[in-house]
Amino acid sequence: MHLLHYFLFSFSSIHEYQEALNEGTFSCRETVSFYLERIHRMGHLNAFVHLYEKESLQTADKLDAERRAGKKTGRLHGVVIGLKDVICYKDHPTTAGSYILEGFQSLYHATAVERLIQEGAIIIGHLNCDEFAMGSSNENSIYGRVRNALDPEKVPGGSSGGSAVAVQASLCMVSLGSDTGGSVRQPADFCGVIGLKPTYGRISRYGLIAYASSFDQIGIFGRNIEDIALILETIAGFDPRDATSSRRPVPSYIESLTLKAQRLTPNSQRSAVNGRRIAVLKEALEHPSLDPEIRVKLRDFIGDLRSKGYQVKEISFDLLDFIVPAYYILTTAEASSNLSRFDGVRYGHRTSDPDSGFPEFYQETRSEGFGKEVKRRILLGTFVLSAGYYEAYFSKAQKVRRILTERTKLIFNEFDIILSPTVPTTAFKSGEKSSDPVAMYLADLYTVYANLVGIPGISLPLFTHTNGMPFGIQAMTNQFRELSLLQFSNELMQQFKSYEIPTL
Ligand code: GLN
């Protein structure tokens, strides 16, 4: 790449980037080189665990040649994307941040990846994460911790910490993560970027390494709503290989967003604003673990919303305290079952003493291969499913989930949007919560709700704390209302954004 281009290249949106490609301002090769150089320079962030240097340059050359030859280009032509290390990319390592998957290469593409590639995206590498997506700080990875680019002593959040930092530090344009209880929205909040978790079943989970199958969903990190909408539109939709993927047609998110923006005259904007009913969960704002400054700023924000004509009502939600316990019972139960497949027989790490006999062979392989947090959750999950405790824990948590689902239906009979904080605090110092799992689990207070009831949620980086760190607000809608969620998010990003995502 010409030296000048390093200074000239900057990414603001996929649309503008593709215009620049078409005008010949940049090529895909130059763009990939730009990102590769940054990834190397920012190696201390530890965001990438596998980098596909040669291959992404080759793909860039192929795309450049096709474009120059006047061939029809895909919707994600030249878009540089990173994948969380739990999303399968054929013939590439996918290790879930775990020693137990050491050396494993995926035999197939995740459906989401296949759809990205079909539209001309360039997969630049796999991103660091908490082992098997279990964690809230990205400190549970075999590859070491990820650093928050705004303050390397602080965590980026988890479990998709690498995916959040990659977008935060401009190491790729957009990235995919997974969200079982907040792993996209929470790191997005800590890093000051946008993070969307769609409705359960909106994106196929085929090729996503399972943590808790009735909660897991692929999510998207980006710098603006349009990009998120475009990626969602590309990867969402029914997949015969995932029986839980929805058959509902995928709306044209991106077209509706851009059309709506064009149509927004002051009058129509007023009616859109007035027509939308927003609920704020009172107990969420009053929760003692919420940082006082975040509480004040969110209250001010609600006041601003009202003064712009939005209908916002605080509603009581007395189930908040049941959410984290129910989540950790149900997800660990599902994890204990899902992770039983890692036994050293078919793939991944195998104990060096394969003659140890059964069941010792499994015990040794799994004891060596899994990290501490994963072991803790397998044990907890096995315990809550065990004959003597099933009723006391697992069944009760299932009941809580059902009650939550019913309550949520009632809320959405009256409201279109639920607003809450994304996380109780801003990014904390590395090591601060590692010895206290319960304190760590509480960081998920506001995010696990959407996974328990399967609704979409987004974290929008609207605010800056006086400690210098960004924080977001979480918006949620009823199931499959991503379009309305994205439209609302776009309005908020345009009208209330006081935090600028830095081009580091
Ligand atoms: N922090 C939560 C957990 O550890 C969420 C993880 C996730 O969404 N993958 O379970």
Image: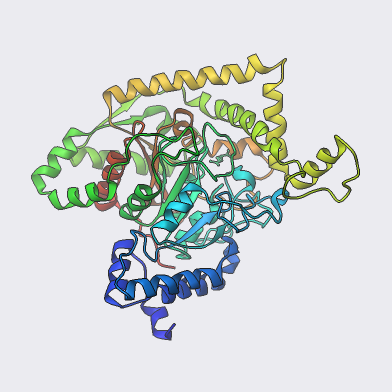
What residue is at 69 percent from the left and 29 percent from the top?
380
What residue is at 53 percent from the left and 69 percent from the top?
55
- Looking at the picture, tell me which residue is in the foreground, 418 or 303: 418
Displayed-image quarter of ligand 1: top right
Q: List x then y, in percent, for residue 44.
A: 60, 67
216 with respect to 8 (left or right): right
Q: How is the image coloured?
A: rainbow
Above or below, 401 relative to 167: above
Q: List x then y, in percent, for residue 125.
A: 54, 62
Residue 316 seen by the camera: no
In which quadrant of the rendered image does the N terminus lie? bottom left
Residue 373: quarter of image = top right
Residue 482 seen by the camera: yes
Residue 15: quarter of image = bottom left
Above or below, 101 relative to 150: above
Q: List x then y, in percent, for residue 30.
A: 42, 77
Above or below, 333 relative to 165: above
In which quadrant of the rendered image does the C terminus lie? bottom left
What residue is at 35 percent from the left and 22 percent from the top?
409
- Looking at the picture, tell me which residue is in the foreground, 185 or 280: 185
What residue is at 32 percent from the left and 67 percent from the top?
17
Q: List x then y, in percent, for residue 208.
A: 55, 44
Count of numbered badges drawn on the protein: 0
